[in-house]
Amino acid sequence: MSLTDTIIIGAGPYGSSLAAHLRAAGMDYQILGEPMGAWRNLMPPGMLLRSEAFASSLHAPRSGFTVEDYCRLKGLPYRPLGMALPLETFVEYGLWFQSNLVGEIQPVDVLALRRVGDQFKLSLSDGRSLAARKVVVALGLKGFAQTPPALRGLPEQYVTHSELYGNLEWARGKDIAIVGGGQSALGLSALLNELGARAHVLMRESSVVWHERPQGGRHILSRIKGPDAGLGRGWRSLFLSEFPGVFHMLDPKRRKQIMEHTYGASGAWWLHDRVVGKVQISHRTEVRSAAIENDRVVLNVLTDGKQARVSADHVIAATGFKTDMRQHAFLSKDLADAISNQGGMPDLTSHYETRVRGLYVVGPACAHSFGPVMRFVYGTKHASPTVARHIVGSLKAGARQRAWPIAHAPMPERSGE
């Protein structure tokens, strides 16, 4: 069993950005997972990124590896604001970033992770076993899909969550009900409609919140009043985009309140004309129950207080995600229980380290600790250098301590973490 300083589980934006920083620091690491796997396999062709182009770059330890740099290299059009970035371009950019800055990525799954002494032991899908001093979980939203109770238990032939969609050709000519009112629901409805499916969006909200198309070249007073930030325009967005460390210092109740009341259901500016007047939307609608009748899904809904029935060939639950580290089947029960708090969310230090020393969590799973910016690629600029610095520092400190004869070893200082 080979021993590695650090193993990164996940080869998406967060795992790749961290790997690039560790590589630049000369650290020994291995990164596991299919390169950009979720983006390549679980998102529909033709999708556009919600984030603005300037906020969609993986974070590199040196200049020259942003989305803008990639577009310039490939001769592709680029604007920092007001340009809808295609999924395909983003995936190709991510793979280019990896080939230049990350090195070898092992396309394997982790079947089991446990702590043995001061090391972590991993069992892989290819039959190998690895050991590491540090492990970083960078798996995005995989495994955290949240489906309404009324839809649970129905066969996947009829009901699935929006996290599972790649190619949508199967839906051509079919009636598709989409439960939800956010970007995922609206984006899927546009793609399905353009494919020739009959999409019907069922949303709790009384109306769709549409974002305005951002414009560059604004005068200084306009920029002062509403600065452009990674998560959108305004001072609140600027704070949440640029100061996750300050967010982490807030009282947990305050953090929870911000997470629940910020960036709710809404649609990107480039979706408006593709949805309004083209896709059927039922507002103030709640699904109460569902059943299979004559090879179709029949939903009993409550719309404006009135009972109704909606029939479809298939139902997509675009109802978001709920972080619960216990849903990661590869985590041993001891680890899952140790790192989980508040219903399965990881309890993290300011260095993204869990209560199990040497085990870190980055990406959307750490959003309740560092804010909504961690749900977006923009968050890599904060998580990657912070975790890399902490890993490098702790490993070097550990090496110095091991170098001392036991009888003359210095007393360890008490940590505030």
Image (cartoon, rainbow, N blue to C red):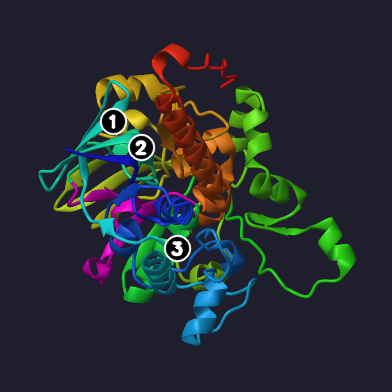
Give the secondary structure at mark 1. Answer: strand
Q: Nearer the viewer, residue 88 or 34?
A: 34
Disc 2 vs disc 1: Cβ atoms closer than 8 Å? yes
Pinpoint residue 272: horizontal percent, then vertical percent.
56, 68
Pinpoint residue 175: horizontal percent, then vertical percent.
29, 62
Question: What residue is disc 3 on?
Answer: 187
| Mark identifier at residue 385 | none
Q: Which residue does the image show at 50% across and 72% down from the upper left? A: 85
Question: What residue is disc 2 on?
Answer: 135
The amino acid sitting under disc 3 is Gly
Disc 3 vs disc 2: Cβ atoms closer than 8 Å? no
Pinpoint residue 35: horizontal percent, then vertical percent.
31, 60
The amino acid sitting under disc 2 is Val
Question: What residue is disc 1 on?
Answer: 120
Is residue 59 at all visible to an observer of this figure? yes
Residue 226 falls in which quadrant of the image? bottom right
Which region is colored magenta? 156-181
Q: Which residue does the image show at 41% across and 69% down from the upper left? A: 100
